[in-house]
Amino acid sequence: MKKAKYVFVTGGVTSSLGKGIVAASLAKLLQARGYSVTIQKFDPYINVDPGTLNPYEHGECYVTEDGAETDLDLGHYERFLNVPTSQANNVTTGRVYQTVIENERRGEYLGKTVQVIPHITDEIKRRMRLLGETGQYDIIITEIGGTVGDIESLPYVESMRQLIWDLGEENTVVIHLTLVPYLAAAGELKTKPTQHSVKMLLELGVQPDVLVCRAERHLSTEIRRKIAQFCNVHQNAVVESIDVKTIYEVPLMMLKEKLDRVVLSKLKLSTRNEPDLDTWRDFLFRLEHPKGEVNIALVGKYVELQDAYKSINEAFVHAGAANECKVSVKFVHSELITDSNVHHKLAGYDGILVAPGFGHRGIEGKVHAVQYAREHNIPFFGICLGMQCSVIEFARDVCGLKGAHSSEMESQTPYPVIDLMEAQKQVTHKGGTMRLGSYNCELVKGSQAYKAYGKSRITERHRHRYEFNDAFKQQIENAGMKITGTNPETGLAEIVEIPSHRWFVGVQFHPELKSTVANPHPLFVKFIKAATEARNDQ
Ligand code: GLN
């Protein structure tokens, strides 16, 4: 039974300073020193989870093994640490209020006025301590979303303040991320925003122990001293975080800055074991010294926002390193692909990935992209909606089922080759009601999927409502598209392949969610391998 210590990570000045990456990097360093670590994220919005958020709002929705729809930062945690997260690792204001209101309705606060303080803050504190109470972890890193000073993050900062008092100084450490901008006209790095941001935290009763300063240029000793003096922290607790080529360099940068040492010494934990980062460095070396290159088209409709396909992009980075090959991913907007321009839009790519998604917009462009990949023998990878599009295209163009569609897009289609799952037919609520989380899948020996995984029983994570319609199975299989992965419990088709094609794989699940630095996803690795071979054959 371990007694957990707590690291809090807050952000100031502006959003997008990379709090999630710094938290994940610190976790990596502590893990590499032999500590068992987990990370949790507290988000100040009122959605009960990010599942109901459009990807344009908040980037991709990351799904955990236990089927929680969570913030994309949990994806970074898993990719860095190679340990799964769960529902408990992501809490939103909506969830906190939901619990408090349910308690109130059950009469648990009978007679009392239910208030932000103490009821909301108590619930936040309870949730902040949940993972620590499992006895599995030495260190819990808690990232507080938003920026200090925002109205909605106040209860979180107050809860943190109280927890520090409850748990004691030697059991807690507060890291505050700030921006140290460079003013070209003055030729100087400016510390004022950092000072103001720390002041704001102090007004709320919290003295940060460590400042991680995002900057475009190195911080001189003088600047570090100034920040330390004005913000009341040790000089060695002023850590610089400058822009690097890839997020995977951040743990090494934090190691150089001794962030892990500063944190451990505040927590009175041993720094005796040096971090073992051999695998990490090896990955980074392969990533930064590619021997070849492939161009991949990512066909989707949320292409304006990088974060919308975060896990897919990262899975490509992992697979590129595994193949010692630079993967250049270009976003191709599915709404702009038509029958007449598809040749132009997709010419010259070594592989085509059709992305997950919801709703009708851009669907025909995706179907054209599938057809182009199929007819030109270009390695094809379809994920979730991408897999469904590959079935639609095959049914229309090879089986001759004119007008075949998914009933999500066209409820009156004569051939609903993709249809609503039986279990979904009664569902009216939107949040948390899809087929979510990890499910078993049995692979057909000899298939591309089997070759990739090297075993026949796998588990993968899902997030969808529609599925391959078994009524068309015979006809589709007879025409040359095979079901090579099936859910052993329900019989649902999970993977389709075209064996006569060089590499054509569509999966109903989301393999990208399980790709990590330590375990690049086998399907992404094989897709990139096939793309490399296709390029060499040209
Ligand atoms: N919209 C499709 C469904 O609900 C696919 C979902 C997805 O791509 N994640 O089945």
Image (cartoon, rainbow, N blue to C red):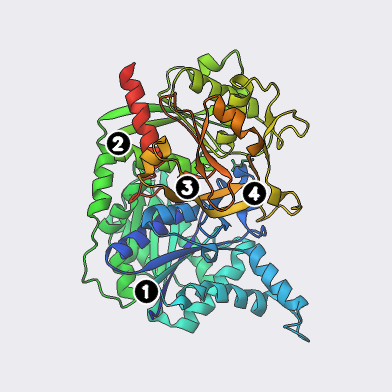
Q: Earlier in the sequence, mark 3 or mark 1?
A: 1
Sequence-first tag of 2 and 4: 4
| Residue 401 place in picture, x, y as percent | 67, 23
Please tell me which of labels 1 and 4 falls first in the chain: 4
Q: Is residue 266 left or right of residue 303?
A: left
Secondary structure type for disc 2: loop
Q: Report whether residue 469 is seen.
A: no
Residue sitting nearer the eye, 110 or 45? 110
Rate crowding at label 2 as few (under 14), some (14 to 19) or many (20 or more) other CA atoms within 10 Å.
many
Query: Ligand 1: does it lie within 8 Å of the C-beta at label 4?
Result: no
| Residue appearing at x 55%, y 49% in the figure | 462
Marks 2, 1: nearer the viewer: 2
Q: Is residue 188 left or right of residue 157?
A: left
Q: Quadrant of the N terminus?
A: bottom left
> Callout 3: few (<14), some (14-19), or many (20+) C-alpha neighbours within 10 Å?
many
Residue that label 4 marks: 53
Point out the frontmost of discs 2 and 4: 2
Where's residue 357, x and y in %?
A: 60, 38
Contact between marks 1 and 4 (CB within 8 A): the answer is no
- Of badges 2 and 3, nearer the viewer stands 3
Dot 1 amino acid type: Asp
Which amino acid lies under the numbered mark 2 shown in the image of this protein? Asn
Q: Which residue matches tag 1?
A: 138
Residue picked out by circle 3? 442
> Outermost residue, bottom direction?
111
Residue under label 2: 323
How far apart in space, not on screen, are marks 3 and 4 (Cα)? 32 Å
Q: Residue shown at 35%/49% (left/top)?
A: 519
Residue 91: percent from left, percent from top: 58, 64
Secondary structure state at the residue bearing disc 3: strand
* Label 3 with label 4: CB-CB less than 8 Å: no
